[in-house]
Image: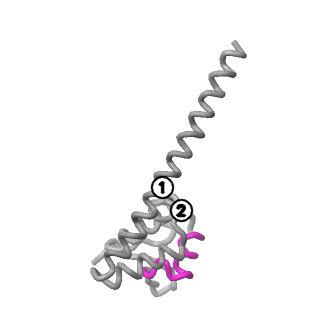
Amino acid sequence: MNKKYYINNLAKMYSISEHTLRYYDKKNILTCFKRDTNGYRYIEENDLRFIELVICLKKTNLSLKNIQRYLQLIEQGETTMKERFQIIDKQLKLAIKMRKDIDEQINFLKNKIEIFKKLLI
């Protein structure tokens, strides 16, 4: 029997709020949730990969609408590989640009810190 993971467990495991997980369920982004006899949401161990995928895609700033689309494409099978590739490729390019922007911000801040250090010593 698969191990059950309840929302509170998942929230702790992935450092995400319970509210967010419930919202993803409500919006049919995470369709793998089941309910126990008390009505509590849970997923089984083999569905953890969907939670991890959604969290990862969300961290890349992929919209919930596009995450939902991507998950639908997965369910449709191999015939959707090209569209899935396009979504991921586009998001990779955006993530690379975000990283470049962050690197520039970090360098700017480091330079300012060095200036302050020289002025304050």
In the picture of the structure, the residue carrying the numbered disc 1 is 95
The tag earlier along the polypeptide, 2 or 1, is 2
Residue 104 position, x and y percent, is: 56, 39
Dot label at residue 121: none
> In the image, which residues are magenta?
19-32
In this view, the residue in front, 90 or 32, is 90
Q: What percent of the width, then of the height, locates residue 32? A: 41, 80
Disc 2: which residue: 61
| Applied colour scheme | one colour
Q: Nearer the viewer, residue 13 or 32?
A: 32
Disc 2 to disc 1, C-alpha distance: 8 Å
Image quadrant in which the C terminus is located: top right
Find residue 50 and report its horizontal and vertical position in percent: 39, 72
Q: Residues within 10 Å of mark 1 (few under 14, many from 20)?
A: some
* The quadrant where residue 5 appears: bottom left
Callout 2–callout 1 Cβ contact below 8 Å:
yes
23 magenta-colored? yes
Query: Which kind of residue does numbered mark 2 sit on?
Result: Asn
Per the image, label 1 sits on a secondary structure element best described as helix
Is 83 a magenta residue?
Answer: no
Crowding around mark 2 (Cα neighbors within 10 Å: few <14, some 14 to 19, many 20+) is some
Q: Quadrant of residue 78?
A: bottom left
Closer to the camera in the image, 13 or 95: 95
Comparing 73 with 23, the one in front is 73
Location of residue 49 (image quadrant): bottom left
Q: Residue at x 33, y 80 (%)?
A: 80
Which amino acid does the dot numbered 1 rest on? Ala
